[in-house]
Amino acid sequence: MTKPATALAEVFDQGIPVLAVLGAQRAGLLAALLERAATAEEFATDLKLDPLATRLTLNVLVHSGAAVHTDGRYQASPELAERARDAPGGVELHLNLFDHLPELLLSGKPLLSMDGTLEERGRHYAQVAQGLGHMYPGAAAELAEALEGEPYGMGDGARSVLDLGAGSGVWSLAVATRMPKARVTAVDLPPVLEGLRHNAAEAGVESRVTTLEGSYFDVELPAAAHDLVILGNILHLETAGDAERLVHRAAAAVKPGGTLAVIDILGSGPYETNPVRAQYALFLAARTSSGAMYSRAEVADWLTEAGLTGMRTVELPSAPPHFTCLTAVRPS
């Protein structure tokens, strides 16, 4: 009788394919596959690799879906090419983060400082913001549609939208696209906003988008000025104290009757009890010094303390697992 597959069995069964991908990344073979098609011997010669090991690794990459083999030549598969183009920071950054785990175990130091100085944040987040934008267009469209209808009713007039830590602008630009009278103020660091402006132009909404350069903790925000304030995928980059402070700051910018939308990895219970959240927590430790995941209950408490009511969860079927939108309203 065949034993049922277990999580540990899957780890060991996939060990060689994973090591093949990481080894190819370290040796420069993955980058070479993305650049051109060549024989195993040509790759080995160009990269100064062992010919046999190169051919064996390439064969595993083919069976893993990372490469294709046609007429004796290997090149990146369409899926790998797509990931290299669209993944936050590209395939190289993701694999480097995975490869950093031994050092993280030894030192506790992340590979990146996405929660570091403003200069570090701007530099690192500019690397990943556009890729994150490619991950969430479906979920952003679902959120915009939900906000347009009841009980929010934002589709019936001119609306002012504030997007704090806007990144690619995927959330607020979806609102602007859905609601022709909506005007967006997008706050982020200068290197990040370059991509957002490009995305606004691509979406045809640039005339209704204003960018405000600076830290979302420091820029001047008029009180009670916006119908919708968005905190999209940023709370997990902050310590609990700073995340709570940011929620209060965002809430203060919401008009009476307006809505604050928090989009993040919000779960219930400790992350240790859920495999997806446990893995995300480890991945977060590789790219931040103090980032953390917060539960829906924690964020709801912060929203309540900030004077907001009417907590609702907006279902985003296209979002990754455990990715949640929690909304709250400032009483009229």
Image: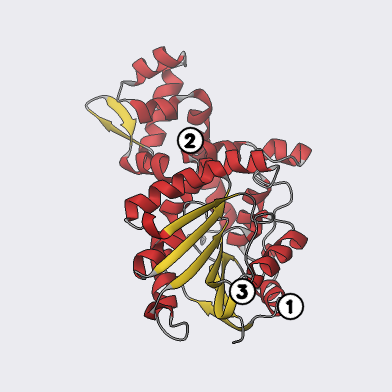
Q: Amino acid at mark 1?
A: Glu
> Is 28 positioned to the left or the right of 301 in the image?
left
Residue pointed to by mark 3: 224
Marks 2 and 3 sit apart, C-alpha to C-alpha, by 50 Å
Q: Nearer the observer, disc 3 or disc 1?
A: 3
Q: Amino acid at mark 3?
A: Ala
Residue pointed to by mark 1: 305
Q: Is residue 230 visible?
A: yes
Label 3 CA crowd tier, 10 Å (few <14, some 14–19, many 20+): some
Label 2 CA crowd tier, 10 Å (few <14, some 14–19, many 20+): many
Label 3: element kind: loop
Of 188 and 243, the residue lying toward us: 188
- Please identify the quarter of the rendering in which residue 317 is found: bottom left
Which is more N-terminal, label 1 or label 2? Answer: 2
Q: Amino acid at mark 2?
A: Val
Q: Residue at x 32, y 56 (%)?
A: 204
Give the numbered dot on residue 21: 2
Which is more N-terminal, label 3 or label 2? Answer: 2
Q: Residue at x 71, y 77 (%)?
A: 301
Which is more N-terminal, label 1 or label 3? Answer: 3
Marks 3 and 1 sit apart, C-alpha to C-alpha, by 16 Å
Marks 2 and 1 sit apart, C-alpha to C-alpha, by 47 Å
Residue 249, percent from left and from top: 68, 66
Label 2: element kind: helix
Q: Please, is residue 230 above or below residue 216 in the view?
A: below
